[in-house]
Image (cartoon, helix red, strand yellow):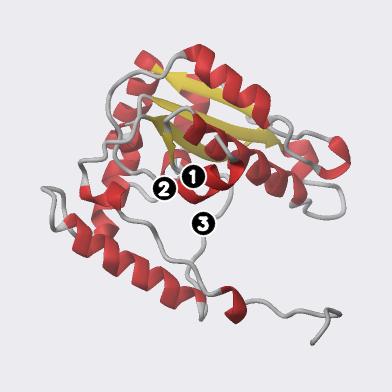
Amino acid sequence: MDILEAVNQRKSIRVFKPDPVPREMLQEILELAQRAPSWANTQPWEFAIVSGAKLDEIRKEYTEKSGEEPCPDLNRPGGFPEPYNSRHRALSKRDSETLKKSKEDPVVERWQPVQGSKMYGAPCVIFIYTDRSIFFQPDNLNVWPVFDCGLIAENIMLLAVNYGLGTLAAFQTVKYPDVLRKVLKLPDSKLIVLGIPVGYPDWEHPINKMYSPREPLNSITTWYGFEGE
């Protein structure tokens, strides 16, 4: 698949079919994704690819903790200043209107946590984590490993399109890291960054038919040194 086509087709999938994803396919995706750049080629990312009974166990424990306040390893935003809040509110409004066409709760603020605890029904989740030793430096906080994890996450999501798969970069999948450490036997030395549900999209669900808008390029870009500028 052409890279332009993959970039244009990639979108956040929030409802998946239960069909399993072959391990060989996931391995190909991850091996290719490792061409992502990183600061000084440190390659700070590690993966836990979870399916089957282990994923069911995580879903069960997340659902049981659903009334508790999330405690992710990386703090979630407390809110957004403008203009970012307006973009967020517009997306939430659109999603709420879309959910009214389905049988789910049309209030996004309630629907997202519930679906997130279920890993959005995906048959597989790729959890990305890094080592605390590279993130927490003696004299400062080194944010670059998390940035690098974001770069390889984008590679994973673009490559998944080539295989007919859908993905979602989801905070909801890592909101209870204590559960992940227990079930997956991850040491406390690992900082859990992100979870990416992976699977075949349920294209019949209205929420998967929508593409989120993007700001016009000329509203966020200033050109310097080009002819006519």
Q: Is residue 219 above or below residue 214?
A: below
Is residue 217 or residue 94 the one in the foreground? 217
**Residue at numbered disc 2:** 12
Q: Relative to 213, is 39 on the left or the right?
A: right
The residue mark sitting in front, 3 or 2, is 2
Q: Relative to 213, is 210 on the left or the right?
A: left
Q: Is residue 99 above or below residue 1?
A: below
| Label 1 residue SS | loop
* Numbered marks: total: 3
Residue 71 screen position, x and y as percent: 48, 47
Q: Between disc 1 and disc 3, whose residue precedes?
A: 3
* Alpha carbon distance from label 1 to label 2: 7 Å
Q: Amino acid at mark 2?
A: Ser
Q: Relative to 163, is 69 on the left or the right?
A: left
Report whether residue 223 is seen: yes
* Alpha carbon distance from label 1 to label 3: 14 Å
Q: Amino acid at mark 3?
A: Arg
Q: Amino acid at mark 1?
A: Ala
Q: Answer yes or no: do the residues labelled 3 and 2 have beta carbons within 8 Å?
A: no
| Label 2 residue SS | loop
Look at 51% across and 72% down and name the residue there. Answer: 215
Look at 34% across and 47% down and name the residue there. Answer: 68
